[in-house]
Amino acid sequence: MRCDCDYHTHPQGHAVRPYTVDLLQPWIDRCRERGIKSIAFTDHDRYREGVDFDVIDRLREINSDIEILAGIELDNDPVTGKSGLEWVETRWDRLDFVLGSVHYLADASRMFDGADQSGQLHSLGFERAYEEYRRQLDALIQRGHTDCLSHLDLIKIHGLVPGAYHPAQFFEPILQQIAAAGLAMEINTAGWRKPVGEQYPAEPILRAAIALKIPITISSDAHSYAQVGEDYTRLETLLEGVGLEQPVRFWRHQRR
Ligand SMILES: [Zn+2]
Ligand SMILES: [Zn+2]
């Protein structure tokens, strides 16, 4: 089984729910049920208060058969982004894995990927929204302190695309940046559960990334333990189709 890791999960969901063994253990049990050997907890950096490295250590002690990575999803939140980055910087050595995400377009106070936020794309115009999204990705990569890019083409979430949109061509400059910076990129199955009905990123982007030898991680973006390894059978088929032998694993920010 090549899909035996899940490197994007949200045990706290969308709130601060401090880490305890009780909160996290069901996620590990689910890994066992679904044949996941390595999991990264990557709550949003705005809920970082709830992250407790000592609890993760305790969880590792009682679940030595599953590799557990301490991670975070660091985004471009205009309010918490700066302090989130500082938090990551000062805890870099305790973190194994940092995802980098763009959830905000310029001057926006809400994440564009919210179910009721497609209006952000309508009011900007799809072309401008996509360009703005790409600019934010560029800034995020330049900012540093990430290991892997999340859901690279998240802007498509609502199923809205500019008239002449060629995914691989549009994201080529970003893929070049990712490769030059030595970062990884994830395949995220959450897109199959959204209006767009397609994994992140689209297959042409994935193929272009593989051609550039960008290391690929796999993930469910689970917001409940029930979603760990969600749609991995379908993911296996996708990986076979694009000829990806083995997704990469991380430990202490190092690929292996
Ligand atoms: Zn995200
Ligand atoms: Zn996420």
Image (tube, rainbow, N blue to C red):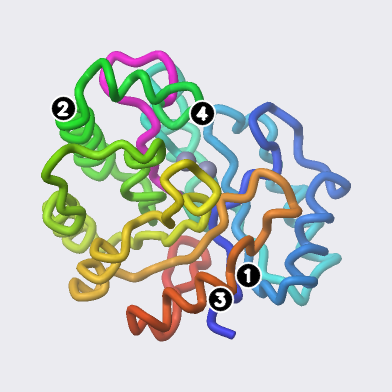
Give percent across and percent down for residue 48. Answer: 60, 33
Type of residue at label 4?
Ala
What kind of element bears circle 3? loop
Type of residue at label 2?
Arg
Q: Report, in whole angstroms, how far the alpha carbon at label 1 lies from the one at label 2.
A: 39 Å
Main SS, magenta region, reads loop
At x 55% / y 49%, what residue is drawn? 193
From what the image shows, is residue 215 above or below residue 183? below
At x 67% / y 59%, what residue is drawn? 228
- Indicate which disc, 3 or 1, sits on the residue closer to the N terminus: 3
Residue 103 is covered by the magenta coloring? yes
Residue 31 is covered by the magenta coloring? no
Type of residue at label 1?
Ser
Name the residue that disc number 3 marks.
3
Cβ of mark 3 under 8 Å from ligand 2: the answer is no
Question: Does residue 198 show up?
Answer: yes
Please identify, in this view, whether the residue under mark 1 or under mark 4 is nearer the observer. 4
Name the residue that disc number 4 marks.
115
Cβ of mark 1 under 8 Å from ligand 2: the answer is no
Name the residue that disc number 1 marks.
38
Magenta region: which residues?
Answer: 99-111
- Indicate which disc, 2 or 3, sits on the residue closer to the N terminus: 3
Q: Report, in whole angstroms, how far the alpha carbon at label 1 lies from the one at label 4.
A: 30 Å
From what the image shows, is residue 105 above or below residue 1? above
Tag 3: Cα neighbours inside 10 Å, few (<14), some, or many (≥20)?
A: many
Does 131 sit left or right of 237 as displayed? left
| Location of the C terminus (image quadrant) | bottom left
